[in-house]
C-alpha cells in the first residue's frame, strides 16, 4: 500500500527517520507521476537540511536503483568497471578513461549525466558530435559494449527513472550539494549498470560541490560504503578542483581536447587531464585484475593512450552510436562560436588564485549550461585557459579566451572572470592532483 507523499515530507521536515516503506513508496510514486514537482522539491530540501542516516541512504539508493530496468553485465564475460566524478569544471576524463579501459580488455558500461549547477555534463559533450546517440535501449547498450568494450549513454525513461527526475530538480532547488543526494544519485546509476568495480573521483576545492576536504572525504566514504555493501569493489580518490581541468571547458571544445589527446597531439595544458585520467584508469585496471598494482595500471593505461589503442576503441564506439567522426580530423575547424573574446593579463605576475565555481558559472552564462530543466545548451560556448595556477604571465599576455552565443552573455562572463582570476607577485601554494585515496578496510 502506498503512503501519502505529504506525510513523508512532513516527517523528514520535522527531523524524523523515514521508514523503508516511506522511502520506497515515495520513489515509486515519483516514477508513476503521482507526486508534483513542488512536493519532490520539498522532500529534496528536507533531506538537504535534515540529512539521512546510513539505513535511509541505503534504502533510498536501492529504491532509485530498482525504479526501472537495470543492466545485467554477466553476458559480457568481462570484468565490468566504471568511473564516476562528482563534478568539476573542465572535467572531461570520462572521454579518455572509458576507451583506455576497453582497450585493456575490461568492460565499461558508462551511464552519465548532463550539466548540473556550475559543472558540465558528459552527455552534453557527447551530443555535440553530429548524430551521436546517448539514448539506447539496454539491448543496444549491451551490443555496443560487447563489440567496443564500452558505451556511454544517459538515463533513459526506463533506466533509473527516479534519479532522472530528482537529478533535474536538484539543479533548480538549491540542493545540489547534499552529500546524501549526491551519493544516492551516483550509486543508484552505477549499481544499476551491473558493475563489479567502481572508481570514484571525488572533487575537493573551490570548484567542487563540496568545498572542504572534510566534506569531500565524508562523501567519498559514503560512496565507498554503499558500493562495498552492494558487493562492488569500490575505491575513491579525492582530487583537487581549484582550477579548470585541462585547456578547454565547455561542450564541443572538451571533446576537441580529448580527441587531440587520443590522437597523440601534445599541448602543455593537457598534462593534468592526462595524469588524472591514467591514474583513475590505473585503479580500474587494478580492480579488474589487469594490473597487479594501481601504479602498474597507470603505466598500462598510459601505454594504451599513447599507442593509439584507446583512440581506435573511441572511434568504434562513436560509429556504433551513430556519431560522425569527420569533425575529429580537424576539431578546431568544427568549433564555430558566435562570439570570441580573449582577456589578457592586466599586470605581470603569477596566476595566483580563482574561485573555480565562479569560473564554472561564467562558462554556464556563456551558454554551456541550462537556464531551466531540460533546456538547450550551446555546443560551442565555453572558455580556453591559457595558463595554470602558478604560471607567470607578462602584462598583456593571453589569460583566457571566451566563446559565447551573444555579446551580452560574453560581457557577463567577462566581468565574472575578471573579478575571480587573480594575479599576484607571489607564486601560490598548490595542492597535489590526488590528495587522498579511500578504500574499504
Image (cartoon, rainbow, N blue to C red):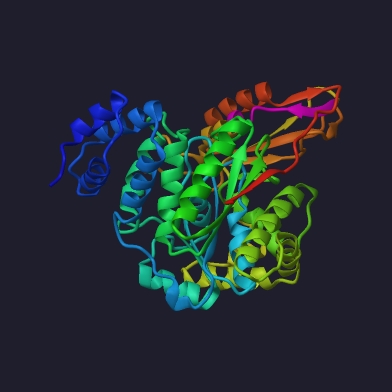
Q: Residue at x 59, y 30 (%)?
A: 211
Residue 71, position in %: x, y? 39, 66
Please give the count of numbered marks on the rendered protein.
0
Q: Nearer the viewer, residue 40 or 297?
A: 297
7 up-or-down from 318: above or below: above
Q: Nearer the viewer, residue 17 or 176?
A: 17
Q: Residue at x 50, y 43 (%)?
A: 222
User: Dividing the picture into quarters, in which one does residue 14 lie?
Assistant: top left
54 up-or-down from 355: above or below: below
Q: Residue at x 50, y 65 (%)?
A: 196
Q: Nearer the viewer, residue 27 or 90?
A: 27
In the image, farthest residue toward the left: 1
360 up-or-down from 157: above or below: above
Residue 100, position in %: x, y? 64, 66
Question: Which range of residues does the magenta coloring cover?
Answer: 349-358
Give yes or no for residue 322 being in the magenta stretch. no
Instruction: Note whether residue 257 is visible.
Output: yes
Q: Residue at x 76, y 38 (%)?
A: 388
Instruction: Note whether residue 112 is visible.
Output: no
Residue 244, position in %: x, y? 66, 39
User: Dividing the picture into quarters, in which one does residue 243 lie?
Assistant: top right
Amino acid at each position: 500500500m502506498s503512503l501519502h507523499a505529504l506525510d513523508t515530507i512532513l516527517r523528514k521536515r520535522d527531523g524524523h527517520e523515514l521508514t523503508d516503506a516511506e522511502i520506497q513508496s515515495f520513489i515509486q510514486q515519483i516514477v508513476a507521476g503521482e507526486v508534483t514537482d513542488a512536493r519532490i522539491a520539498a522532500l529534496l530540501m528536507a533531506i538537504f537540511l535534515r540529512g539521512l542516516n546510513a539505513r535511509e541512504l541505503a534504502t533510498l539508493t536501492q529504491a532509485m536503483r530498482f525504479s526501472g530496468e537495470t543492466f545485467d553485465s554477466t553476458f559480457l564475460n568481462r570484468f565490468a568497471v566504471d568511473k564516476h566524478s562528482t563534478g568539476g569544471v573542465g572535467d572531461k576524463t570520462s572521454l579518455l578513461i572509458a576507451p583506455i579501459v576497453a582497450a585493456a580488455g575490461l568492460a565499461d558500461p558508462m551511464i552519465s549525466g548532463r550539466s548540473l549547477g556550475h559543472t558540465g555534463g558528459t552527455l552534453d559533450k557527447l551530443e555535440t558530435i553530429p548524430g551521436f546517440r546517448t539514448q539506447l535501449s539496454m539491448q543496444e547498450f549491451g551490443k555496443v559494449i560487447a563489440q567496443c568494450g564500452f558505451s556511454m549513454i544517459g538515463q533513459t525513461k526506463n533506466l533509473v527513472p527516479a534519479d532522472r527526475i530528482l537529478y533535474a530538480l536538484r539543479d533548480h532547488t538549491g540542493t545540489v550539494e547534499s552529500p546524501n543526494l549526491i551519493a544516492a544519485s551516483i550509486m543508484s546509476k552505477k549499481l544499476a549498470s551491473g558493475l563489479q568495480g567502481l572508481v570514484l573521483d571525488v572533487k575537493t576545492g573551490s570548484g567542487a560541490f563540496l568545498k572542504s576536504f572534510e566534506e569531500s572525504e565524508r562523501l567519498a566514504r559514503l560512496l565507498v560504503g554503499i558500493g562495498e555493501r552492494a558487493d562492488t569493489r569500490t575505491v575513491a580518490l579525492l582530487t583537487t578542483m581549484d582550477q579548470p581541468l585541462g585547456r578547454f571547458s565547455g561542450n564541443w571544445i572538451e571533446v576537441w581536447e580529448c580527441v587531440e589527446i587520443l590522437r597523440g597531439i601534445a599541448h602543455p595544458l593537457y598534462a593534468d587531464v592526462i595524469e588524472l585520467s591514467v591514474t583513475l584508469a590505473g585503479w580500474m585496471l587494478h580492480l579488474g585484475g589487469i594490473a597487479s598494482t594501481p601504479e602498474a595500471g597507470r603505466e598500462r593505461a598510459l601505454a594504451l593512450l599513447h599507442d593509439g589503442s584507446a583512440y581506435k576503441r573511441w572511434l568504434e564506439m562513436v560509429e556504433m552510436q551513430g556519431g560522425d567522426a569527420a569533425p575529429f580530423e580537424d576539431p578546431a575547424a568544427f568549433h564555430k562560436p558566435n562570439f570570441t573574446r580573449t582577456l589578457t593579463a592586466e599586470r605581470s605576475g603569477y596566476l595566483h588564485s580563482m574561485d573555480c565555481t565562479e569560473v564554472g558559472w561564467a562558462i554556464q552564462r556563456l551558454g554551456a549550461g541550462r537556464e531551466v530543466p531540460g533546456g538547450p545548451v550551446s555546443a560551442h560556448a565555453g572558455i580556453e585557459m591559457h595558463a595554470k595556477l602558478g604560471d607567470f604571465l607578462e602584462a598583456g599576455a593571453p589569460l583566457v579566451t571566451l566563446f559565447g552565443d551573444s555579446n551580452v552573455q560574453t560581457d557577463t562572463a567577462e566581468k565574472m572572470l575578471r573579478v575571480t582570476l587573480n594575479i599576484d607577485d607571489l607564486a601560490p601554494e598548490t595542492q597535489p592532483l590526488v590528495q587522498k585515496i579511500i578504500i574499504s578496510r
